[in-house]
Image: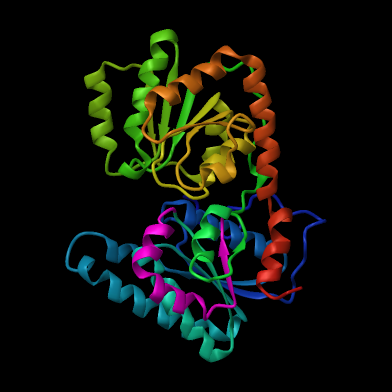
Amino acid sequence: MDAGAASFYGEPVGANAPRWPQARVAILGPFPPRPGGVAIQCAILADALTQAGAQVTRINTDLPTWRGEGWRKPLFPSAQVVHLLRALRRTREAWDTLHVHAASWWGFMPAVVGLFARRWGKRLVLTYHGGEAAAFMAQYGPFARRVIMRYHALLTLTPTQAAIFTAHDLAPRIVPNIVPLARFHFRARGPVAPHLLWLRHLEPRYRPEDALAVFARIREAFPQGTLTMVGGGTLSDHLRREVKRMGLTGVRFVGPVPMSQLPAIYDAADIFLNTSAVDNLPLTLIEASASGLPIVSTDAGAIPDLIQDGKNGLLAPIGDAEALAEAVWRLLSDADLARRLSLAARENAARFDWPAIAPLLAQAYGLL
């Protein structure tokens, strides 16, 4: 992914967007080139805050030289904690609010380390990412609750995720991810061609094999159909072998791509297919919506908070390739449905643009 401070939000935030010239915020989380939606989100947030006039400090939780093979890899957890503690201490005079981006399991470690900023009188804000919050809180709830209670604000991305923390006597605020609509060209679809796009990591939790199963069913009726799979991961070679074993033509593996190329990839497709088994608020679904792509997705995790079946997308059960293929078939055979979902998708995406999210963050940061 692209790394520059001004490359992620893209267009200027606009004259009507809030201006925060007095705000001094440190963002602690992964940043590109670390892959994944959280890294992209941290970069977009840092860029949007900078354009709003805030002074932004980036504290990267990723240490790529320690993640590879060799003697460094076993020492990565310790090196990461030491790195973050040093970075917090070194930069503490430059910021008043620490915004930590954490997740489940070891991904919760930044939330623990961030507590050190309390001794300097800083305001602490925690955004919880990922789709495994329920399992994590079931196992580590008492410990996690003690940590989270020391933050001034807990932010979750969806109502489903918020309910998990509410059940542990916490008081989350819902502040979704930011997707800059200006980056994505909207093109109303309907009728649609059988050109499917799948864009996630090629990892088991996203069930990319199901995308092949869905496409195989579609190809039976639409031999001219195509499936573009964007992303890298541990299943990359396996999926290529599966395509050959199935004798499936029309599948194109693109691999990971820079964020600057994503708008064109969305624009070239007609239907967005998501097959994940674990999810919270995937950026890919919002970006696809911003591009006007009719969406067919599983109902994993908090996806129903984002996509309402029949209103701005079509949902099917996890692992049900037959139901997913049937939903794709509905779009291909009903131009009115495809166009209605395409228009509704763009409208749905508008609630994730910076002008809609900025007031929520201002409240969490104590700027109002």
Using the image, determine if residue 136 lies above or below residue 353: below
Image quarter in which the C terminus is found: bottom right
Residue 226, quarter of picture: top left
**Residue 332, x across and y down, in percent:** 54, 15
Residue at far right of view: 16
Q: Would residue 53 be seen by someone viewing this image from the given angle?
A: yes
Left or right: where 215 falls relative to 330: left
Residue 357, quarter of picture: bottom right
Residue 130, quarter of picture: bottom left
Residue in view at x 69 percent, y 48 percent: 351
144 falls in the magenta region: yes
**Residue 216, x across and y down, in percent:** 35, 18
The one nearer the camera, 262 or 199, is 199
Q: How was this image coloured?
A: rainbow
Residue in view at x 34 percent, y 40 percent: 202
Residue in view at x 38 percent, y 77 percent: 83
Q: Would residue 62 be seen by someone viewing this image from the given angle?
A: no
The one nearer the camera, 314 or 18, is 314
Using the image, determine if residue 128 lies above or below residue 337: below
**Residue 108, x across and y down, in percent:** 40, 68
Residue in view at x 68 percent, y 32 percent: 344
Using the image, determine if residue 149 lies above or below residue 299: below
**Residue 54, x across and y down, in percent:** 69, 70
Left or right: where 330 falls relative to 347: left
Q: Which residues are magenta?
A: 131-158
203 falls in the magenta region: no
Left or right: where 102 falls relative to 98: left
Left or right: where 233 falls relative to 152: left
Residue at far left of view: 71
